[in-house]
Image: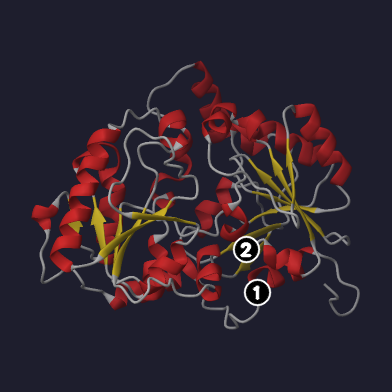
Amino acid sequence: MVRQHEVIFLFVTVALQADIEKYSLTELTDMSIKVIVADLTPVIAPETDRAISQRRMNDNSIENKVFHSYDEIRNFIKEYSDRAFFFLMFDQYYAVRKIYSYLNRYQVSYGYVNHLEPDLGVGKEGMEGYLRPKLNLSRVKSALYNRLLRKIYPCKYADLIVFGGVANEETYFKLGRCNGKTKRLYLRTFNYERYLRVNEYDNNGREYCVFLDQFFPYHPDNIVDRKWNINAEKYFEEMNRIFEYIHDTYKLEIIVAAHPRGDYTGKPYAFSGVKIEYGKTSELVKSAKLVLAHFSTSISFAVMACKPVVILCTPEVARFEEAYCREYQQKFNYPMWRGIEDDDRSYLFHIDEEKYQLFLKEYVICEKLCDTNIALWRKIADEIFEQEGESDV
């Protein structure tokens, strides 16, 4: 596809320091592949860009470029069009239509790794997720493009799409700009890649319960995109009550695995009396006695580690995402609590191993992939870079 060993990631959500680990980007730099992260958020989603307070990507080994105009983006794509392989961390939809026009104009080699995360909801929502219930002129235009025009507008098709499992494969394929010539590569998810390579969390021998935080009341997607009016005071009151109950009843320390975009500094309402750890989700799950969650994709870590999970669908969460919580509960036969009164002690630490194994097979790691000792990006690099004889990357 391309001869130069350069990779560019196009982000339309703010590129954070935590994304280096999330996407295992150091595997690329360890292979002497130049990595550039192009943050297009100020142009594509300025409200989201302003809402993020978490630490932005800043690493000596990875070049991070932030763009503030379409002209800057166009000139950048033109400059690297014949030098690098581009990975789009987004699908094809109305808000990014200009980006796809640049890819077409300069005949860029590009692909998708943005769905290397297990998401139960995408099969249900699919393309419908692009059409919001409350319509205005802007959303009508968006819906028209997403459902019809994007299929007929001239645009270069992707060279590659990578899957971590076979579930939702055709939906992911349709969400991007793919056709019969787009190479399908079956590997494993980024979560599984991280899980393989991290150590267990050291809590000095003390047993603990980990909560997979989703930054629920403050997440920019919930506030800016979905326009949810979440009662943060009520949410944290409900959560803190459950944490206190588990601590007192089961003698487990509570540790919050903070969401990558989470930043509770200066927030008027937050978790109380618990430890909050940033950037350690996979490590925390590996050694946890119990896992608590709403509907986080990080539940896949609990499946990999064969840990029991309780779905917390408190009244404030249920106002917005009860269906998502229930989907995870049914998928794994988990107990689901609205509050402490739902605790069935005989069922709390139950694990349905058959459902876990099926999930790993469908969503996390493809059966065709046997050698997990080979880095995920090593396999992708072999596909995207033209080789003369034996690989020297």
Query: Which residue is situated farthest in the right direction here?
Result: 388
Q: Quadrant of residue 152?
A: top right
**Colour scheme used in the picture?**
secondary structure
Query: From where the camera sits, is residue 330 visible?
Result: yes
In this rendering, position of residue 185 left or right of residue 267? right
- The quadrant of the rendering that contains the C terminus is bottom right
Question: Percent position (x, y) of residue 139?
Answer: 50, 23
Q: Bin the neighbour count of mark 1 within 10 Å (Cα to Cα): few under 14, some 14-19, many 20 and up.
A: some
Element marked by disc 2: loop
Residue type, numbered disc 1: Ala
Quarter where residue 162 is shown: bottom right
Instruction: Provide the secondary structure element on which disc 1 rests.
Output: loop
Q: Is residue 113 left or right of residue 264?
A: right
Q: Residue at x 46, y 31 (%)?
A: 225
Q: Residue furthest top?
A: 137
**2 or 1: tag closer to the N-terminus:** 2
- Local crowd size for mark 2, using a 10 Å CA cut-off: few (<14), some (14–19), many (≥20): some
Q: Please tell me which residue lies in front, 126 or 306.
A: 306
Label annotation for residue 295: none
Residue at 46% over, 17% down: 136
Amino acid type, label 2: Ser
Q: Please report the residue visible at 19 percent of the width from the left and 68 percent of the height from the top.
A: 251
Residue named by callout 2: 24
> In the image shown, does 224 or 278 lie closer to the viewer?
278
Residue at numbered disc 1: 375
Left-right relation of 166 to 338: right
